[in-house]
Amino acid sequence: DGRTPKLDIEGYMLRYLSAHSSLPVPEVLHAAPHLLLMRFLPGQSHFNDAAQTHAAELLAALHAISAPAFGLEQDTLIGGLHQPNPWTDSWLDFFREQRLLYMGQEGVRAGRLPASVLRRVKAFCGRLDEWLVEPERPSLLHGDVWTTNVLAQNGRVTGFVDPAIYYGHPEIELAFTTLFGTFGQPFFVRYHELRPIPPGFFEERRDIYNLYPLLVHVRLFGGSYVSSVERILRRFGF
């Protein structure tokens, strides 16, 4: 299905997070393309209010870590798919070219996204600046925060796993936590206290940013995820 068994890249991402942030991640003991050994982390993917609050504190701290540009020193993976990260000065350019258009084209190549939908994505990408703005600075992102990639125990997060790291706009990370119901109000109340979320995120920008994970799911699975992409495009007039 196009996924790449490069576990050494996952090992690299976990080690990067460990070296550059305080985000709890598994210790990597050995990383090779077909073998990844990590130290066991206790926990389950169930988050009470206390665990959501702790997750907000951890991600707010992660998002405070910056770089001179958007992207990363190397390409990474998301869901086993190639994720390009060329250093880019503009967030809008990076999000347009390396996230929406790249993954949309991959979906068409895989026969899972109709070319007509990709044309609508391209038209939308030409007007992203009507809804999105450049952040003050790039933020380090986990890149794939959803329920099964977070572990918690006794109201505390014990670890984040399966990252897809790069430096980007933290709102794309926040948006994805809402797509499949990973976190709710306790998370966002605490995160907003630490890093205020500008108005319009929940009303508009969240849907725009969730086009990327939806296009990833289209590339992997097709089916109803195409309809989800189309719903967002229609909402914005495309």
Image (spheres, helix red, strand yellow):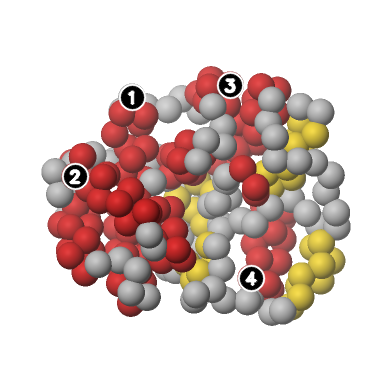
- Residue in the picture at 39% in, 63% down: 222
Residue corresponding to mark 4: 9
Type of amino acid under label 1 = Pro
Residue corresponding to mark 3: 186
Type of amino acid under label 2 = Arg
What element does badge 3 sit on? helix
x, y percent for residue 128: 22, 48
Q: Earlier in the sequence, mark 3 or mark 2?
A: 3
The one nearer the camera, 111 or 19, is: 111
**Corner quadrant of residue 113:** bottom left
The one nearer the camera, 109 or 126, is: 109
Point out the frontmost of discs 3 and 2: 2
- Residue in the picture at 19% in, 44% down: 234
- Residue in the picture at 74% in, 50% down: 25
x, y percent for residue 4: 57, 76
Residue corresponding to mark 1: 199
Q: Earlier in the sequence, mark 2 or mark 4?
A: 4
Q: Is residue 209 left or right of residue 26?
A: left
Q: Which mark is residue 234?
A: 2
Alpha carbons under labels 3 and 1: distance apart = 18 Å
